[in-house]
Every structure is written in C-alpha cells, then in structure tokens.
Amino acid sequence: MTIYADSRGGSLIIERRFHGRRFRQATGLPSTPQGRKTAEAWEHMLLALLEGGRSELVWAIGKSLTFHDLWPHYRTGAWSRMPSPEHMAPLFDSVRSWLPTAHKARGAPISEVHRRTLESSFKALERLRPRATVADVPDLLRAYRVECEKRGIGRTFRKAKNAAQAFLRETLGKRRSMLWAEVSDIPDVAYSRSVTQAVSVARLVEIRSALPPAHAAIWWALCCSGMMPDELWGHKWRVEGAGLAVGGTKTAYRRRVVPLIVVPKEPERLYKAFRVALQKVDESLTPYVARRSYGHWLEEAGINPTRRRLYMGHAAKDPHEQYPEHDVGPHLADDAALFTGCKGFEVMT
C-alpha cells in the first residue's frame, strides 16, 4: 500500500519507490473515502509524469511545487502549462540575477541604458506584487496593462511587456513553457508616437541662444555631430584628426566618423535637466530634434548621399548602397566646410 494515513492523525501520505528512488510526501488530504480517491488520482499523475519524461516535476513536489500546482493542468491535458521549479522561483530575485547577463535575441550584449530600462520596468511590476513568482508574470502584466491604459501610458506598458518577454526567453525559453506565449498574447495599449521633425538651421541657432550656457553647449554638440544623447553622456566619442569618431549604440553602423564642427565637452548637466531646459524654450523640443536636424543639414549642404548615410550611422536600405562603403576620411574637412556654409548656420564656440 502506497497511500496511508499519518499515525499522528495528519493527512494521507503517498509513499513508493520510483525507479529505485524513494518518494514520500504528505498530500494534505484527509483520511476519508474522497480524500483517498483524490490521493490515488495524484499517484497516477506521478506515474504518468515519470513515464512522460517530466520527472523533475515529481521530485520538486514538497520543495518548490505542490500537488495542487500540477493537478489542474494534468487533469485537463495541458502539460505544457505545468509550472516547473523555475516557474515557482521568486520573480524579482530571478530578475536581479538575470539582468547582469541579459542580452539581445541574437546574442549581442545590451547597453547600460537598455539594462536600466529593463530594471525600471520590473520595478513597476514589483510594486504590484512584491512576492510574485515567475509563473505570475502574465497576471502581473495584465494588471499593469489596466493601470497603464487608465493613465494613457501605452508605451510604458510596451516596455514592460518587452522586458518580461526578454526575461522569459532567456531563462525559460519560448517553447519550454507557455509563459512566453501568454505574455506575447496580452494586447498592447494603444498609443501615438510623436514624430520628431527637423527644424531649420536658423531656428536651432535661436534655441541655442535661448538656453543657459551649460545646456547650450550640450545642444550645440548634438546639433553639430548627430550624436544620440547616450552617446554624448556616455562619452562614446573621440576626436580623430579632422573627424569625430562616435562609438554608436544600436548597431555596427552607428560606429562612425563625422566631420568635426565643434569639439564636444563633457556635459555639465544631467540628461533630465537638459531635457527640462529644452522644454522651457519650446514644449515640443526633445534632444532628438538635434539629430534629425543634423541629417537635414547634411542634405541641405549637398553632401554626397552615401557619406550622408555613413555620417548618420544608417544601414543601407537598398542592396546597391552596400557597395560604395568608401573611407570618409579625405572628405571630412570639405564636408565640414559645406556643413557650416549652410544658410543661417553660425559656428558658435
């Protein structure tokens, strides 16, 4: 007999040997006909899991799993939804262990800015349920979706959903459990993306004049180099002769050399303070306006389209554009002269 009542008056116990290994676990069921019937069904579940190649679930019962975690999915035939020991791990402890090694889907390492974005998304989820397990991720996201929809912050929800998918993909895999698919099926919250428009050279000079000196220096460095904010604040640039080498952030194309118009300086203000200063001048302004306008200036100056693409750090959209990847070095000084010769442009030091 493998099912018996605890002599001390406790619950029914299932005890037997599976493949030479002893299994003994209290069920929490009373010693009644119905309790014994349920215990027998659970015992059959254990045998089926062992024969079906899911022995890790059997030996996790009483440690990180319970019979109740497995029974509903076994009974309905949804074995792929059965929580594994990894599913029952504390979510945010697992996230903190994963973040230092997080990488992109193709295996490339992520930037520190991306890592901080992932961390902030999980902090928002942790506020909803601090003691959540990995298996709770879909429910947490559904609750967070309701909150984001009420507040009209659809993009914030999308970031949280992407963070959850990345975590599940790298720790459990897409096919090993249904969690990744459940998260993927949660609908996004609708939001409209603001389109950052380029502005005239004269207008950007006006904006520089309206900013405090420390912020004006940052603004002009972005305007004259096409750098992204994290490239400037992350010091991913250096002067190389007549050019400015920029380290890039997204792809290999972003590692580029651009004409040297002004020598950037270490930003004396933090990014958030700079953004606030811009919006005091004009509420529609963002730091990205500088980069988009840089591309506009290159076009207005009549700079060769291939070099223009290389200066912006854009990948080739047409296969024919991939061939003329020439060295921009001999053209840097001439292109800088064309750039500064645009109508309304004034080199301000």
Image (tube, grey):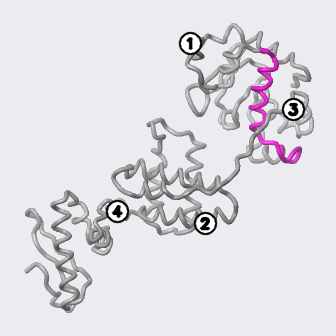
Disc 3 vs disc 2: which is toward the camera? 2
Q: CA distance from mark 3 to mark 2?
A: 40 Å
Which labelled disc corresponds to residue 204? 3
Q: Horizontally, is 201 left or right of 178 in the view?
A: right
- First in sequence: mark 3 or mark 4? 4
What residue is disc 2 on? 146
What's the amino acid at mark 1? Tyr
- First in sequence: mark 1 or mark 3? 3
What residue is disc 4 on? 81
- First in sequence: mark 1 or mark 2? 2
Closer to us: 160 or 299: 299
| Badge 1 element | loop
Residue pictured at 56% horizontal, 55% vertical = 160
Q: Is residue 338 above or below residue 138?
A: above
Q: Characterize the magenta stretch by its predominant secondary structure.
A: helix
Q: CA distance from mark 3 to mark 4?
A: 56 Å
The image quadrant of residue 205 is top right
Q: CA distance from mark 1 to mark 4?
A: 50 Å
What residue is disc 1 on? 323
